[in-house]
Amino acid sequence: MFSFGKKSAPILGIDISETAIKLLELSLRGKKYQVESYAVEQLAPNSVSEKTINDIEQVGEAVASVVRKAGTKTKNAAVCVAGSSVITKVISMPSGLSDDDMEGQIQIEADQHIPFPLDQVAIDFEVNDEPSKDDGNVNVLLAAARTEIVDNVVASLELGGLKAKIVDIEAFTIENTVAWIAENFPAGVSKDVIAVADIGSRATTFSVLEGLKVVYSRDEAIGGVQLIEEIQRRYSLSFEEASIARKQGKLPDDYESEVLEPFKENLVSEISRALQFFYSSSETTGIDILILAGGVASIPGLADLMHSRLETKTMIADPFSNMNISPKVNKKTLANDAPSLLIACGLAMRSKG
């Protein structure tokens, strides 16, 4: 089931995070995408932790619910597993091998590079179109994940009435969406080096793309939950009450100065630290633009603060700014959720071609 080398249509992009399941369905008409359906369903606490499914039944129920909300009839889906649970390796192999010979060679290579018994991992590979530096060879991308992780994702979708046609890798879905967003960068902004901060509930995935390919990824232990917990602590609210109060903007007058601004400053510090880690491990000395994604990316003033502190162009992710929107889709709620649909969008784009 572990497959990232093929595309099929039509297909749903299903992003399973720690707090919610996001569904997105795209169609491609000529070179123009259209959003056909989308929905978000909250997950029960601890159903997913550290990007790993703990409770297949609860996640399956949420999948069924998000499908009903979206009103889609499509049953095939693309999902992904986190980069932290995936091993990838580019290997050089002789060109012209038959499929059977290549699979046999891949098994030998996998045995050398994967620190788990091969009967406990799901493996796939893709031949890179770019020629290898070695004459007569081709570069092959090998990817492997623990079978249990992949099986839990597939089983959750099946319980929700969907079929997992593609199990992708998180970094590749980011590449898909960022490549699309980059087509509409502001004038004068280069696509050469792009940083992405996907701010999740408990962690932020910081990625750097060079030539629209992820070359660096790091998780930072900060996310939207920390903001909710601070609201909860300061104003003696339950977690649910704090979440609702933040969404509705019904918080005391000192909220911005005492809670929100310190949270923003902390977030900027963590992104700056991740950026410095990247620079220390790379010959690259600067980025062209920082894209903010995730549920808290749209916090007022956050993008401006990042721009000011990091001295780099910063934008909030909106994959749908150059897409058509079906009349069935609520444009306002889609716009509000757009920054958090980075992964779902990259998955839904697998339906093209």
Image (cartoon, rainbow, N blue to C red):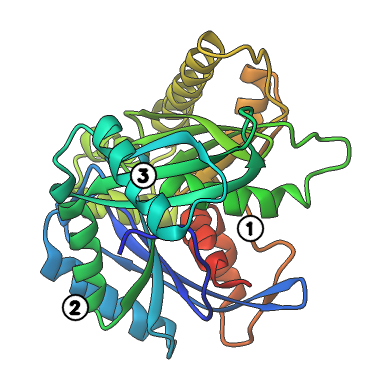
- Quadrant, the C terminus: bottom right
Looking at the picture, tell me which residue is in the foreground, 5 or 212.
5
Q: Disc 2 vs disc 1: Cβ atoms closer than 8 Å?
A: no
Relative image position of residue 8 (x, y in whole percent):
51, 75
As displayed, is residue 311 above or below residue 242?
above
Element marked by disc 3: helix
* The N terminus sits in image quarter: bottom left
| Lower position in the chain sequence, tag 2 or tag 1 | 2
Residue 187's disc number: none
Please state which of the two labelled residues, at mark 2 or mark 1, is closer to the viewer.
Answer: 2
Q: How busy is the neighbourhood of tag 2: few (under 14 within 10 Å), some, or many (20 plus)?
A: some
Residue 276 placement (x, y as % from top left): 52, 13
Vertical placement of residue 53 versus 233, above or below: below
How many numbered circles are shown? 3
Spatial CA distance of label 2 from label 3 is 36 Å
- Kindly check if marks 1 and 3 are in contact, taking CB atoms under 8 A apart as contact: no
Secondary structure at numbered mark 2: helix
Instruction: Identify residue for label 1.
Output: 319
Residue 342 in percent (x, y) is at 52, 54
Which residue in the structure is indicated by mark 2? Answer: 159
Kindly identify which residue carries mark 3: 105
At label 2, which amino acid type do we have?
A: Leu
The amino acid at mark 3 is: Gln
Answer yes or no: is residue 301 visible: no
Q: Is residue 56 left or right of residue 112?
A: left
Task: Name the residue type under label 1.
Answer: Pro
Residue for point 30% across, 31% down: 113
